[in-house]
Amino acid sequence: RIAYVNGQYVPYAQAGVHVEDRGFQFADGVYEVVAVKDGGFVDLEGHLVRLERSLDELRIDRPMSRAALSVVLAETVRRNRVRNGSVYLQITRGAARREFPFPDGVAPTFVAIARHLDWAKGAANAARGVAAITHPDIRWGRCDIKTVGLLPAALAKQAAKESGAYEAWLVDDQGFVTEGSSSNAWIVTKDNVLVTRKPTHEILSGITRSAVLELAKREGLKVEFRPFTVAEAQAAKEAFVSSATSFVIPVVTLDGKPIGNGGPGVVVARLRSLYEAHAA
Ligand code: PDD
């Protein structure tokens, strides 16, 4: 395997950054995950636009142009012979003597890695439906920035794993679902209306979420942008998650309670197939 580290392609085993990298010390960095399907990127442009927004919000310098970045990602994928999988990229503020304020004159750290993924496994999950649990949302107030400060998400995902669930749906202080630990959360009402939160500071505005919204609009499906409670989700007709690596996957139980008839529903199945066609 080959990793990209600050301008060089290096063997995976030797790929490292400095001990005083601010990504390591302060989670002072941002990342993206882009799906690779049959040799092509899925929604690359959207991911790069969001990356630049995350960098701008944190005032981290862009290491290179969007076009140059795309070349690095394509080259990382090519050198690893990944036809189906994902590419992960991370940009931090850089390495500097440990001090809380931003250091002067430091170049950002930019790394990228590619990995294989078996999309057939995702399709099998989609056919069966998956379990989700709920977990308190203890993240910070700027979840719209895709930072590497992922400890609360890791704790939630670990709780899901220990319960045999695929995802943890994070719940705010008022009992409303914000999103999944690494995906956006949706429900479908009895009237086939999609419900998902507005993309505020409380959630990450998913690139897959945007694509699904566009596909749903073309299908003539109605969408309500509002929070929903755990009880409303458990009483919904269908529910699902969306993300770059999950695409669209039906959630069929929430904290052990079946959603709808406890199996994948028709609306989510339709959205999944539309999204698969979009990603092809
Ligand atoms: N996670 N919400 C959170 C908190 C996420 O971490 C992600 C993505 C999403 C979905 O966004 P998108 O559709 O752009 O992938 C929503 C990635 C896949 C990850 O951390 O691995």
Image (cartoon, helix red, strand yellow):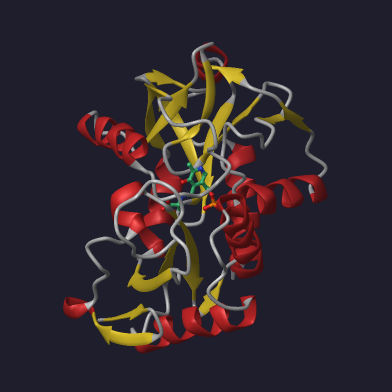
Task: Pick the residue in front: 16 or 88.
Answer: 16
Q: Count of labels shown?
A: 0
Residue occupying the point 44% across, 48% down: 101
Q: Is residue 14 left or right of residue 63?
A: left
Residue 190 as seen in the image, left or right of residue 40: right
Which image quarter holds the C terminus? bottom right
At 39% across and 62% down in the image, what residue appears?
120
Does 186 appear above or below 63? above
Q: Position of residue 198 (x, y in %)?
A: 69, 32
Q: Answer left or right for 88 relative to 186.
A: left
Task: Return the residue nearer the eye: 177 or 165.
Answer: 177
Quadrant of the image containing the N terminus: bottom left
- Spot the residue most to the left: 13
Residue 220, compared with residue 279, is above or below; it is: above
Depth check, front residue: 17 or 224: 17
Residue drawn where x is 83% and y is 42% of the image: 220
Quarter holding residue 94: bottom left
Q: Position of residue 62 (x, y in %)?
A: 57, 69
Expressed as whole percent of the image width and height from the top left, the position of residue 230 reads 50, 16
Question: Is 229 located above or below residue 15 in the figure?
Answer: above
Where is 228 relative to 92, above or below?
above
Q: Left or right? Give the position of 135 relative to 193.
A: left
Residue 121 drawn at (x, y percent) = 35, 57
Q: Residue at x 53, y 23 (%)?
A: 177
Residue 262 visible to the viewer: no
Q: Is residue 214 visible?
A: yes
